[in-house]
Amino acid sequence: MSTITLLPHPELCPTGARIEARHGSSLCDALLGAGIEIEHACEKVAACATCHVYVRAGGASLAAPSDEEEDQLDDAWGLEASSRLACCVKLGDSDLTVELPVHTRNHARE
């Protein structure tokens, strides 16, 4: 099991959250399973970049992004070095701290 610390997001998780998730599950599935309604327009097949997140801590423990993920990240709003697609991040035993962007490719949230 790993612990995901989700930083506060004004709409999706105003107070932040701490989530326990199983090794091998996707970050997107873990967030959705905890009631965090992260956008995932392509139904989690790495084809849209709407589940873009920032991995603020613990990212070094994750597998490197695949070429497919890197290609989709090019279309993400607010791309940073810590950017990942939640549908592509497979959880290991290490804890993560994650921030959800205020804006996504499909919706501008203000």
Image (tube, rainbow, N blue to C red):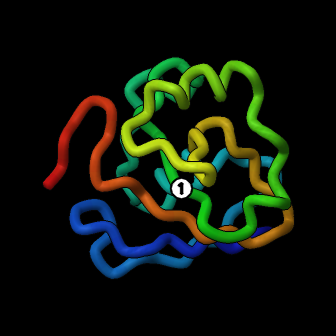
Measured from the top left, where is residue 8 in percent x and y? 37, 74
Nearest to the observer: residue 101 or residue 15: 101
Name which residue lies at 77% across and 28% down. 66
Say which amino acid is labelled 1. Tyr
Q: Is residue 49 left or right of residue 8?
A: right
**Image quadrant in which you'd find residue 11:** bottom left
Q: Residues within 10 Å of mark 1 (few under 14, many from 20)?
A: many
> Is 41 situated above or below 55?
above
> Is 55 situated above or below 45?
below
Name which residue lies at 21% across and 36% down. 107
Residue that mark 1 sits on: 54
**Image quadrant in which you'd find residue 18:** bottom right
Dividing the image into 4 quarters, which one contains the N terminus? bottom right
Measured from the top left, where is residue 32 in percent x and y? 47, 51
Name which residue lies at 68% across and 63% down. 21
Measured from the top left, where is residue 73 in percent x and y? 54, 31
Dividing the image into 4 quarters, which one contains the C terminus? bottom left
**Image quadrant in which you'd find residue 94:** bottom right
Nearest to the observer: residue 37 or residue 51: 51
Name which residue lies at 81% across and 52% down. 62
> Is 41 situated above or below 11?
above
Measured from the top left, where is residue 104 in percent x and y? 32, 40
